[in-house]
Image (cartoon, rainbow, N blue to C red):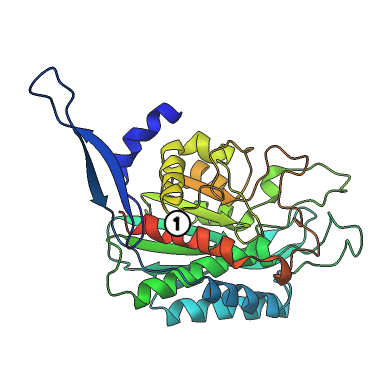
Amino acid sequence: MKTQRISLIFLAIFVFSGVAVYFKSCQKPASTESAPVEDVAITLNPAPDFKADSAFAYVKAQVDFGPRVPNTKAHKACGDYLVAKLKQFGCEVISQDFVATKYDGTKMNARNIIGSINPSAPKRILLTAHWDSRSVADKDTKDKNSPIDGANDGGSGVGVLLELARTIQQATQKPNVGVDIIFFDVEDHGEPEDYKGEHKPESWGLGSQYWAAHKHKENYTAYYGILLDMVGGKGAVFPHEGTSMQYAPMIVRNIWDIASRLGYSTTFIDADGGGLTDDHTAVNDVGKIQMIDIVELHPNSPETFWKYHHTHGDNLSNIDKNTLKAVGQTVLSTLYQE
């Protein structure tokens, strides 16, 4: 509720370099006359500048491999690229190989990719995105059985997290917490729109389901987690996703408060969105880690998702650097307030 927001200001002081927030403070008057109102400037923790051009380049690099559909050369090559980039950025990297079963019984060779920054730090923040792309364009009007580029649905979240890892590596001042980046595989291979059989929520997010039940380190936990999904679309808005509000409302409000202080209140909107089954579902339910989902939703529109969701319009031409910047700077600044 809005009446609770003021208390969050003191729980999470968020901003990037050079920004200050001003609060009105009233001193107790010595008489019945009105006391003067004094402006008190609170300088917030600085964070490095997030480079949207660089994040965009990482999105393009993924798309250039072709659709990242399991059991294809493009999928393997892109996975190898992601491992190499995380290592280049100083991360401790673990590849979690497994075989996933698609809704139709197809076996998919899959790989979750984990990169850890400051792996010895006891307090950890978990950042995730999925790196696979959908094998069909089931919401399109043509070539419905062909795979999509997945520039936004998959590529954008990964691009933001790669740039975040690079930025932290090069920063003089590091965050006070450890950061674990997980690129989940086989998120986007649930039933097509026109599938005649039963549509099961558990057919989606297979990589996060596997990781939640088989964590990369025994007894692994994190203070909280952030999932990025479709975070690069032109004119994107991110309302409070419903499942996130169910499991971690304080985390949602804190992060949206950061975004507002950074000037992104028209992107991170103060509105309720629908609840989703996404990679954060298994992390919350099975992994027992509070994780929220930053995902483009349009709660007041007949089309809930981004307009190019699961179509061939999900390509590089519809990625907006301004959206990548808003998300990347907000998440990066969040880390520097811990």
Q: Nearer the viewer, residue 280 or 7?
A: 7
Q: Residue furthest toward the front?
A: 33
Residue under the point 72% across and 72% down: 71
Task: Name the residue rendered at 85%, 44% in the picture.
Answer: 197
238 to 173, vertically: above or below: above
Q: Residue at x 53, y 70 (%)?
A: 52
Residue 31 in the image: state x and y as whole percent: 9, 19
Q: Is residue 323 left or right of residue 6?
A: right
Can residue 216 be seen by looking at this rendering?
no
- Direction right: furthest residue: 142
Residue carrying label 1 = 330
Where residue 153 sits: x, y (%)?
Answer: 67, 60
The amino acid sitting under disc 1 is: Thr
Q: Is residue 81 in view?
A: yes
Q: Position of residue 204 (x, y in %)?
A: 68, 51
Image-based side of 60 in relation to 34, left or right = right
Taking the image as shown, residue 309 lies to the left or right of residue 322, namely right
Marks counted in the figure total: 1
Rendering quarter of residue 133:
bottom right
Give the secondary structure at mark 1.
helix
Q: Nearer the viewer, residue 221 or 299?
A: 299
On the image, the x and y values in percent for residue 256 come to 46, 45
At horizontal 48% and vertical 37% (from top left) the residue drawn is 247
